[in-house]
Image (cartoon, rainbow, N blue to C red):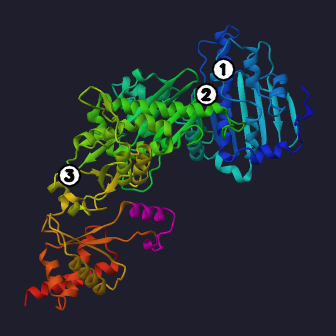
Amino acid sequence: MAMKKGNLSINSENMLPIIKKWLYSDHDIFVREMVSNGCDAITKLNKLSVIGEYERPDDKQDSIHVIVNPEEKTLKFIDTGIGMTEQEVEEYITQIAFSGATEFLEKYKGKTDADQMIGHFGLGFYSAFMVAHQVDIDTLSYQEGAKPVHWESDGESEYEIGEGTKDSIGTEITLHLNEDSYEFCNEYRMREVLNRYCSFMPVEIYLENANAPKPEPVEPKADSESADSEDKEAKEPEAPKPINDIHPLWTKHPNECTDDEYKDFYRKVFNDYKEPLFWIHLNMDYPFNLKGILYFPKINTEYDSIEGTIKLYNNQVFIADNIKEVIPEFLMLLKGVIDCPDLPLNVSRSALQNDGFVKKIADYISKKVADKLSGMCKTDRESYEKYWDDISPFIKFGCIKEEKFADKMMDYILFKDLDNKYLTLEEYKEKNHLTADKEAEEPESEVVDTDGTTIEPDQDAESDENEDDKEPKKDTVFYVTDEVQQIQYINMFKTEGKDAVILKHNIDTPFITQLERRNESLRFMRIDADLTDDFKGEDSIAEDDAKSLTETFRKVLSNDKLEVRVENLKDNDISSMMILSEESRRMQEMMKMYGMAGMDPSMFGGQETLVLNANHPLVKFVLEHKRSKNVPVICEQLYDLAMLAHKPLNPDEMTRFVKRSNEIMLLLTK
């Protein structure tokens, strides 16, 4: 049959170069397009078989073969799908962006399942020209009496089409690679790309090397008695294995999956050999189709950043990692897969179209995670507590980022106290008899006179009381950020029977700020933020003594702005300590966060206050022997000891502290 020529039907003469160079950000994505088109063709043929329009041979096996040929610098994609007639090739291939899948669905509407149509043979096909200087198509339609068709194009606006030689139903696409794309005819490089994009496509995919030597059959040994089963097995080469899993775990019902399967899948997909803490299997059919598995990995909460991986699929075709429109930002800290055939993807499937439907999917995923976590807290508190230290950064980040998630999870946030017990906020309040919010809710009780009439409260008295107490009462929750650094304060709390919670992660500061915003009767203070009356003795300090100590320490430390408080502390073992108001600390942390760490904290009232215990012998010595030559070294040592229990000394301060400590010990030897 004579070949004929024609022109590609392009709406704009500049469209093809744009498709070839700019439609896809990653050039290796052409593999996904070629393979998914093959899957699409096979799916179409199977649908026709189901509805009786095609009689499928009993021995027919659905498959896609990807064949690399390093010698000829070609790459082939061969499918056993529906094939095309010459007319269909001209429609689906020469008219760029004409979707064969769309027409097929329209024709067989109501007879097939649209969710399984994953390819759009047309625009995606032209991604091949990103890496090839010529593309050939050889195809044979399933239709009775159909003739094979050969089509080829060099990627410009012309093509040739005519009768081909293919003798089996399906399509074979040959890419003649550009010089700068020879990497794709390398077997190992192609395996890498297939694993990235096609690991879970619904049709078996086989990778072959056209130049690889054929395995030679092993002859059975003549002198052996055993023409037995072992020799027979040796003669048969191992059958090729597909590179993909056509039934990934997320496509199954959760009841059909075992814990070992979930763990194996996690290791395979994420190359993480630490076992995940637990997982959430998503399986939804209405109002949209969504399946997936989200894993909570075990993390080291000491690290500043926690990065997860959410792989997004569309009908088992890989789309992207961590698309923010679908996955709530806080869940990107997790690892998992999401498969949603209903996603409104753009033509290149590399991004989402702006659609309110996408927000509903994100809301659903967030809700399912909240339901799983809250359900675990209610029904399996022991496991929930065991996982808490690892999962708390995810949950707290979610509460900060998403108000609806916070609404669902606030009652299930756990706090570890000084006894290493995990308590919800309400349980902690009850344990420590915190009642500010309850008092605020209780209405003022009526006063009844002896004759039974209600006495109205004295409005003037109430007004006076409000003048004296404008600030509403708040429940104070003390917290610890470093159990080693702040051990002095912890011991003081334990001695007085007071409690605090452990908040060691970077996410905790913004999280407690949000908690305070949501609950006006609640405030958080670090354990070294102030001294309550519980730690003070009954005796008062003479104003002149406090002034004298302040002047002495300021002079010795050469700091006229040093804040000094003199208190009678109950614990006489404590000579000095450092406090910093909660507001100042949070301001300092905010300055660090926004790169203002070099600014003077005192500009914002951010200086620490040195607290001296008037009951301690060293403090008494400084007060009573101001002119002693030992006073300067005692003052410096008391200051550094207080600072050490508060935060680490900088290198220069530590050097001076160690040197001074040695000098003090030498005095003991004299």
- 629 lies above or below 378: below
Instruction: Say which element carries label 3.
Output: loop
Instruction: Classify mark 1: residues with Cα within 10 Å, few (<14), some (14-19) or many (20+).
Output: some
Residue 593 falls within the magenta-colored stretch: yes
Residues shaded magenta:
583-603
Who is closer to the viewer here, 555 or 28?
A: 555
Residue, disc 2: 341
- Position in image of residue 598 (x %, y %): 47, 73
Q: Mark 1 is on which residue type?
A: Ala
Looking at the image, do the residues carrying marks 1 and 3 touch, with CB atoms under 8 Å apart? Answer: no
> Quick one: which residue is furthest to the top in this view?
52
Number of numbered tags placed on the structure image: 3
Residue at image x 57%, y 24%? 289
Which callout, 1 or 3, points at the residue further toward the start of the chain?
A: 1
Looking at the image, do the residues carrying marks 2 and 3 touch, with CB atoms under 8 Å apart? Answer: no
Residue, disc 1: 114
Q: Main secondary structure of the magenta part?
A: helix
For residue 542, side relative to residue 260 (left or right): left
Would residue 40 be visible to someone looking at this image? yes
Instruction: Classify mark 3: residues with Cα within 10 Å, few (<14), some (14-19) or many (20+).
Output: some
Residue at image x 92%, y 33%? 5
Who is closer to the viewer here, 140 or 579?
A: 579
Instruction: Say which element carries label 1.
Output: helix
Residue 282 falls within the magenta-colored stretch: no
Q: Mark 2 is on which residue type?
A: Pro
Q: Mark 3 is on which residue type?
A: Lys
